[in-house]
Image: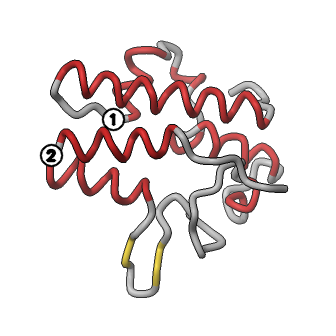
Amino acid sequence: MEKLTKEKAIKMHREMWNWIANKIKLSGKIVDRLYYFRSVQAIPDDRPDSLCYCCEYAMQQNGGENVGRCKYCPLDWDSKCDEFMCLDVIQGGDYKGLLAQWDTEMIYLDKIERTVQIAEKITNLKEREE
Protein backbone atom coordinates (compact mmCIF):
# COMPACT_ATOMS: atom_id res chain seq x y z
CA MET A 1 0.00 0.00 0.00
CA GLU A 2 1.12 3.55 -0.64
CA LYS A 3 2.83 5.57 2.07
CA LEU A 4 0.22 7.27 4.24
CA THR A 5 0.45 10.59 6.00
CA LYS A 6 -1.22 10.92 9.37
CA GLU A 7 -3.85 13.17 7.84
CA LYS A 8 -4.61 10.76 4.98
CA ALA A 9 -4.81 7.74 7.31
CA ILE A 10 -7.31 9.55 9.54
CA LYS A 11 -9.31 10.80 6.56
CA MET A 12 -9.51 7.33 5.02
CA HIS A 13 -10.35 5.79 8.42
CA ARG A 14 -13.25 8.22 8.84
CA GLU A 15 -14.49 7.68 5.29
CA MET A 16 -14.46 3.90 5.73
CA TRP A 17 -16.26 3.82 9.08
CA ASN A 18 -18.77 6.46 7.98
CA TRP A 19 -19.50 4.38 4.85
CA ILE A 20 -19.96 1.26 6.99
CA ALA A 21 -22.33 3.01 9.42
CA ASN A 22 -24.39 4.47 6.57
CA LYS A 23 -24.51 1.18 4.67
CA ILE A 24 -25.84 -0.60 7.76
CA LYS A 25 -28.44 2.12 8.33
CA LEU A 26 -29.63 2.00 4.72
CA SER A 27 -29.61 -1.76 4.25
CA GLY A 28 -30.61 -2.89 7.74
CA LYS A 29 -27.87 -5.51 7.48
CA ILE A 30 -24.50 -5.56 9.14
CA VAL A 31 -21.50 -5.10 6.88
CA ASP A 32 -17.88 -5.31 7.92
CA ARG A 33 -14.56 -3.81 6.85
CA LEU A 34 -13.88 -6.58 4.35
CA TYR A 35 -17.22 -5.82 2.69
CA TYR A 36 -16.15 -2.18 2.48
CA PHE A 37 -12.92 -3.08 0.72
CA ARG A 38 -14.67 -5.46 -1.66
CA SER A 39 -17.21 -2.76 -2.50
CA VAL A 40 -15.04 0.35 -2.58
CA GLN A 41 -11.42 -0.74 -2.96
CA ALA A 42 -11.27 -3.21 -5.85
CA ILE A 43 -7.50 -3.73 -5.78
CA PRO A 44 -6.40 -6.13 -2.99
CA ASP A 45 -2.99 -4.43 -2.76
CA ASP A 46 -4.73 -1.25 -1.66
CA ARG A 47 -6.07 -2.88 1.49
CA PRO A 48 -4.28 -1.64 4.57
CA ASP A 49 -2.79 -3.90 7.21
CA SER A 50 -5.49 -5.31 9.52
CA LEU A 51 -8.07 -3.67 7.23
CA CYS A 52 -7.34 -0.43 9.09
CA TYR A 53 -5.74 2.71 7.68
CA CYS A 54 -4.51 3.71 11.12
CA CYS A 55 -2.83 0.32 11.61
CA GLU A 56 -1.21 0.69 8.19
CA TYR A 57 0.02 4.18 9.04
CA ALA A 58 1.34 3.00 12.42
CA MET A 59 3.16 0.08 10.84
CA GLN A 60 4.73 2.38 8.25
CA GLN A 61 5.88 4.68 11.04
CA ASN A 62 7.33 1.67 12.87
CA GLY A 63 9.55 0.66 9.96
CA GLY A 64 7.17 -2.00 8.71
CA GLU A 65 7.17 -3.86 12.01
CA ASN A 66 3.94 -5.16 13.50
CA VAL A 67 5.17 -5.40 17.09
CA GLY A 68 5.18 -2.01 18.79
CA ARG A 69 3.30 -0.22 16.05
CA CYS A 70 0.31 0.77 18.19
CA LYS A 71 2.25 3.60 19.80
CA TYR A 72 2.07 5.28 16.37
CA CYS A 73 -1.70 5.00 16.00
CA PRO A 74 -2.95 8.49 15.13
CA LEU A 75 -6.25 8.10 16.99
CA ASP A 76 -7.12 8.16 20.68
CA TRP A 77 -9.02 4.96 21.47
CA ASP A 78 -9.40 6.02 25.13
CA SER A 79 -7.48 2.95 26.24
CA LYS A 80 -5.14 2.25 29.12
CA CYS A 81 -3.27 -0.31 27.00
CA ASP A 82 -0.03 0.26 25.12
CA GLU A 83 -0.81 -2.35 22.47
CA PHE A 84 -4.05 -3.03 20.64
CA MET A 85 -5.73 0.05 22.05
CA CYS A 86 -8.63 -0.46 19.67
CA LEU A 87 -9.36 -3.74 21.46
CA ASP A 88 -8.35 -2.50 24.92
CA VAL A 89 -7.24 -5.91 26.10
CA ILE A 90 -7.49 -6.17 29.87
CA GLN A 91 -5.99 -8.96 31.96
CA GLY A 92 -7.75 -12.26 31.46
CA GLY A 93 -8.70 -11.53 27.86
CA ASP A 94 -11.45 -9.05 28.71
CA TYR A 95 -11.83 -6.98 25.54
CA LYS A 96 -13.38 -3.57 26.24
CA GLY A 97 -12.26 -1.41 23.30
CA LEU A 98 -14.52 -0.06 20.59
CA LEU A 99 -13.25 -2.46 17.94
CA ALA A 100 -13.79 -5.41 20.29
CA GLN A 101 -17.30 -4.13 21.00
CA TRP A 102 -17.89 -3.79 17.25
CA ASP A 103 -16.80 -7.37 16.63
CA THR A 104 -18.98 -8.67 19.45
CA GLU A 105 -22.10 -6.78 18.40
CA MET A 106 -21.59 -7.52 14.71
CA ILE A 107 -20.56 -11.15 14.80
CA TYR A 108 -22.23 -12.57 17.86
CA LEU A 109 -25.23 -10.43 18.60
CA ASP A 110 -26.25 -9.06 15.19
CA LYS A 111 -27.54 -5.85 16.78
CA ILE A 112 -28.06 -3.35 13.97
CA GLU A 113 -28.64 -0.16 15.97
CA ARG A 114 -25.84 -0.81 18.45
CA THR A 115 -23.43 -1.73 15.66
CA VAL A 116 -24.19 1.57 13.89
CA GLN A 117 -23.56 3.48 17.14
CA ILE A 118 -20.17 1.82 17.59
CA ALA A 119 -19.22 2.43 13.94
CA GLU A 120 -20.11 6.11 14.38
CA LYS A 121 -17.98 6.33 17.54
CA ILE A 122 -15.07 4.76 15.68
CA THR A 123 -15.60 7.21 12.81
CA ASN A 124 -15.33 10.18 15.15
CA LEU A 125 -12.43 9.20 17.39
CA LYS A 126 -10.23 12.13 18.36
CA GLU A 127 -6.70 12.50 17.08
CA ARG A 128 -4.04 11.46 19.54
CA GLU A 129 -1.94 14.19 20.97
CA GLU A 130 1.72 13.98 19.98
Is 21 positioned to the left or the right of 124 in the image?
A: left
Q: Quadrant of residue 2?
A: top right
Q: Position of residue 51 (x, y in %)?
A: 50, 38
Badge 1 element: loop
Is 71 positioned to the left or the right of 21 in the image?
A: right
Quarter of the image with the N terminus in it: top right
Asked if marks 2 and 1 touch (Cβ < 8 Å), the reply is no
Residue 83, labelled with which disc?
A: none
| Three-letter amino acid code at the position of disc 1 | Asp
Q: Residue at x 45, y 15 (%)?
A: 40
| Three-letter amino acid code at the position of disc 2 | Asp
Q: Residue at x 80, y 32 (%)?
A: 5
Q: Which residue is mark 1?
A: 32
Q: Position of residue 124 (x, y in %)?
A: 54, 40
Nearest the viewer among 79 and 39 is: 79
Please identify, in this view, whether the residue under mark 2 or under mark 1 is nearer the observer: 2
Q: Which callout, 2 or 1, points at the residue further toward the start of the chain?
A: 1
Residue 110, labelled with which disc?
A: 2
Mark 2: give few (<14), some (14-19) or many (20+) Cα within 10 Å.
some
User: Where is 15 relative to 108, above or below?
Assistant: above
Q: Residue at x 40, y 34 (%)?
A: 33
User: Where is 50 relative to 108, above or below?
Assistant: above
Is 89 positioned to the left or the right of 63 in the image?
A: left
Badge 2 element: loop
Q: Quadrant of residue 113?
A: top left
Mark 1: give few (<14), some (14-19) or many (20+) Cα within 10 Å.
some
Marks 2 and 1, Cα distance to the nearest angstrom? Answer: 12 Å
